[in-house]
Amino acid sequence: MTAGATGADGVVSLWADEAGPVDAPLIALIHGSMDRSSGMLKLGRRLDTTHRVARYDRRGYGRSVDAHGRHPGPFDMGHQVADLLEVLAGRPAVLVGHSYGGNVALATAAHHPHLVRGVVVYETPLSWEPWWPGNTAGAAAVASGSDPELAAERFMRRMIGDERWEALPDRTRATRRLEGAAMVAELADLRRHVPWRPEDVRVPLAAGYGSGGAAHHARAMRQVAEQVAGAVVVELEGCRHDAPLSHPALFADRLVLPLLARLG
C-alpha cells in the first residue's frame, strides 16, 4: 500500500505498515478518531517480536490522504471495514481497536468472522445508545459539523489541551484541521447506524477501560463484556483514554497477551 497515492478513479490508497516475523500470526491495530497509526506504534513494538503486526492510517487520517491532505470518503462503517479487509488481505487476525477503531474491529468480527481470531477493544464509544452523553468531545464535533476544520480544532483542544495545541507547528495544526472531515462524518455515521450487534460477535473478546478515564467509557466496556458471550472486561489502573500510547506495556500485558493466551 502506498502513502497517500491517488489512482485514476480518485480513490486514495491506504497507508499501512507491518513488522514482525512474516510467518507469525497476525495482529491488526486500528486507531481512533483524530489519531493515526503512529499512536499505536509503541503498542505494536511490544507485540511484534512474536507476532506479525499491521498498522494503518484509516481513511482521511495521517498518510491515507491525497496530495492536498484530504480524502473524498465515504467514511461510513462499511467502508471502514472494507479498508481493514484490504489490510488483512485474506489473513485471519487478532484485531486491537482503540476508541472508534474498536467499532471497526467489532463490525469486522460480526460480518467477517472467518477472518477474526479475537478482538481487543479499549474505550470504544457506543454513541448510538440512548444513554450515551451528549456532551462528549465526539458529540461536540458532530454538532460543529458544518465547519469540519473548526470541529477538528475544538476536538484536539479538548483532548490535548489548549497549551499543547498552540505549541504545535502551524503545518501540523493545518493537517489536523483537514482531518476534521473524516472525524465528523465517521462519528455522525456512528450515531445514526448501529455498526454491530452483540449476538453477531462470536470470537474471544477483551474490553478495556482506564481507571482515569470517563465514566461513560467504563460503562460502555462493561456493557460490551456483559452482552458478548464469553467476553471479559479489564480496568487498566492509572490509564486514561490514550492508554495504547501512554501505557503500551500495561495495555499489552493486561489486554492483548491474555487474549492471545486464550487463543493458544
Image: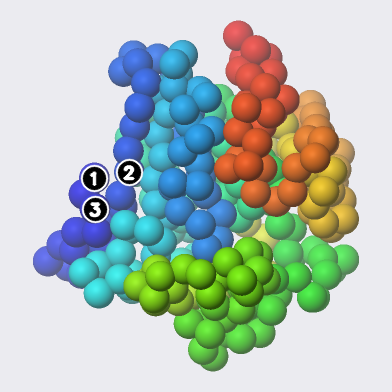
Tell me: residue 247, above or below residue 23. below
Task: Please report the residue visible at 24 percent of the width from the left and 53 percent of the height from the top.
Answer: 3
Classify mark 1: helix, strand or loop: loop
User: Looking at the image, do the residues carrying marks 3 and 1 touch, with CB atoms under 8 Å apart?
Assistant: yes
Task: Please report the residue visible at 72 percent of the width from the left and 25 percent of the height from the top.
Answer: 254
Q: Which amino acid does label 2 sit on?
A: Ala
Q: Which amino acid does label 1 sit on?
A: Met
Q: Which amino acid does label 3 sit on?
A: Ala
Camera-near label (3 vs 1) is: 3
Q: How far apart are marks 1 and 2 (CA)?
A: 6 Å
In the picture of the structure, the residue carrying the numbered disc 3 is 3
Tell me: residue 197, above or below residue 250. below
Q: Earlier along the polypeptide chain: callout 1 or callout 2?
A: 1
Q: How far apart are marks 3 and 1 (CA)?
A: 7 Å
Q: Where is residue 6 in the image (x, y as percent from the top left)?
A: 18, 63
Tell me: residue 230, above or below residue 149. above
- The local crowd at label 2, few if under 14, some if 14 to 19, many if 20 or more residues have their Cα within 10 Å, is some
Q: Is residue 263 visible?
A: yes
Comparing 212 with 97, the one in front is 212
Q: Earlier along the polypeptide chain: callout 3 or callout 2?
A: 3
The tag on residue 1 is 1
Q: In which quarter of the image is residue 193?
A: bottom right
Task: Please report the residue visible at 35 percent of the width from the left and 72 percent of the height from the top.
Answer: 171
User: Looking at the image, do the residues carrying marks 1 and 2 touch, with CB atoms under 8 Å apart?
Assistant: yes
Comparing 201 with 165, the one in front is 165
Comparing 26 with 215, the one in front is 215
Classify mark 3: helix, strand or loop: loop
Q: Can residue 229 be seen in this view?
A: no
The tag on residue 16 is 2
Task: Please report the residue visible at 24 percent of the width from the left and 45 percent of the height from the top.
Answer: 1
Q: Distance between the residues labelled 3 and 2?
A: 8 Å
Q: Where is residue 157 in the image (x, y as percent from the top left)?
A: 62, 73
